[in-house]
Amino acid sequence: MTDLHELVPDFSILVNGSELSTDILVDVVGVSVHQDVNAASMFTIRMMTWDIQKSELTWVDDSLFNVGNTVSIKMGYVDHVQEVIAGEITGLELEYIAAEPPQLVVRGYDRRHRLLRGRKTKSFLNMKDSDIAKQIAGNHSLSPTVVDTKVKLDYVLQHNQTDMEFLLDRAQRIGYEVVVEDKKLYFRPRQVAGSEALTLDLQQDLLEFFPRLTAVTQVGEMSVRGWDIKKKEAITGKATSESTKLGSKTGTKAAGTFGTRAEWSVERPVSTKAEADAIAQGRFDEMALAYVTAEGKILGNTSLKAGEIVKIEGAGKRFSGKYYVTSAVHTYMPRTGYETNFTLRRNATDG
């Protein structure tokens, strides 16, 4: 990885497409962006909001921070900043403590927050999950990019759920993820099979790293049961291995030390064998990714994003290798610089 120790941290903020000038940025005391694969990514901008000469509040009533304004936040280093979130302002807070300068806190989310507005009960007939994702994206003025889920479903019910809750539920049951980048919505398989976006060495790049391995939640087989109403017979879907392995020794093999463990899932209605198999595989993959989990911190790097793959080196055979990034928090503060905290998951080791 590039030696970031010698670089000068920097950031920029665009509101409604216009970059904030230096006289505005000088009041910024902190910026953070929280990316998460299972929730809308959020941002926080913290600003001094006091005019010493006039003894009055400054930014509190400025139209620059109207709810609904679009925001793009870029972080990185001088002459090399990259976007970490594009979203919309959803809230403001004033923090006033006597004898201290007041601060304005600007909060917002990526456009996934639009899918959280209002619970619905709705049915979808003869549609694939990927088709449902397209329809929901269009309803929120988002451009859909989906990977075909192939299985056509006779009947799907959205029962008193927000569109985000419903779409995440549909995604997670088959090992998919819901990602929004600016005005694009992606409905796709979890990107575990991708190449690493970043390689991090334990001693040279990582400021903190806390990996954990546990075989307690691992299973050797996942089965899903359903009922075919037309044929009046039971349906069973099974999965016995990970779709993609992030190492040579899986959690399934490790769990086998204590005997074979199978798990049945009957909580979700299914109507075809293909649907049952897809759900079983999605559930198996989700549990497998709990085999190795980790948290860590590095000097800020925009390449470390939720949903990407990172490679850890120098942490021994068990904890070195590829990991799936489940969350990343990018934080810039003028006094302390730019740092990135993250959480990782992995379904296998190499030792």
Image (cartoon, helix red, strand yellow):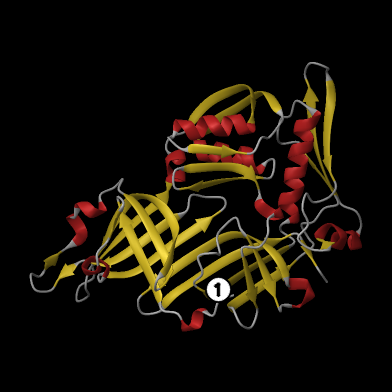
Q: Is residue 173 left or right of residue 138?
A: right
Q: Residues within 10 Å of mark 1 (few under 14, many from 20)?
A: some
Question: Is residue 128 left or right of 53 when viewed as pictured?
Answer: right
Q: Which residue shows up at 73% across the image and 72% down it?
A: 320
User: Is residue 192 found left or right of 233 in the rendered image?
Assistant: left
Q: Residue furthest front?
A: 79
- Residue drawn at x 26%, y 54% as measured from the top left: 65
Residue 349 percent coordinates (x, y):
79, 66
Residue annotated with mark 1? 297
Residue 239 x, y percent position in the rendering:
83, 44
In the rendered image, the residue lying farthest to the left is 54
What kind of residue is marked 1? Lys
Q: Which element is circle 1 on?
A: strand
Residue 64 location, quadrant? bottom left
Residue 32 image point, x, y percent: 41, 64
Number of numbered discs visible in the structure rendering: 1
Q: Residue at x 36, y 79 (%)?
A: 335
224 up-or-down from 253: above or below: above
Q: Nearer the viewer, residue 278 or 78?
A: 78
Residue under the point 55% across and 32% down: 134
Residue 254: x and y, percent?
85, 63
Q: Is residue 343 above or below residue 42?
A: below
- In the picture, which quadrant includes the N terminus? bottom right
Name the quadrant of the C terminus. Answer: bottom right
Above or below, 156 against 256 in this view is above
Quarter location, residue 334: bottom left
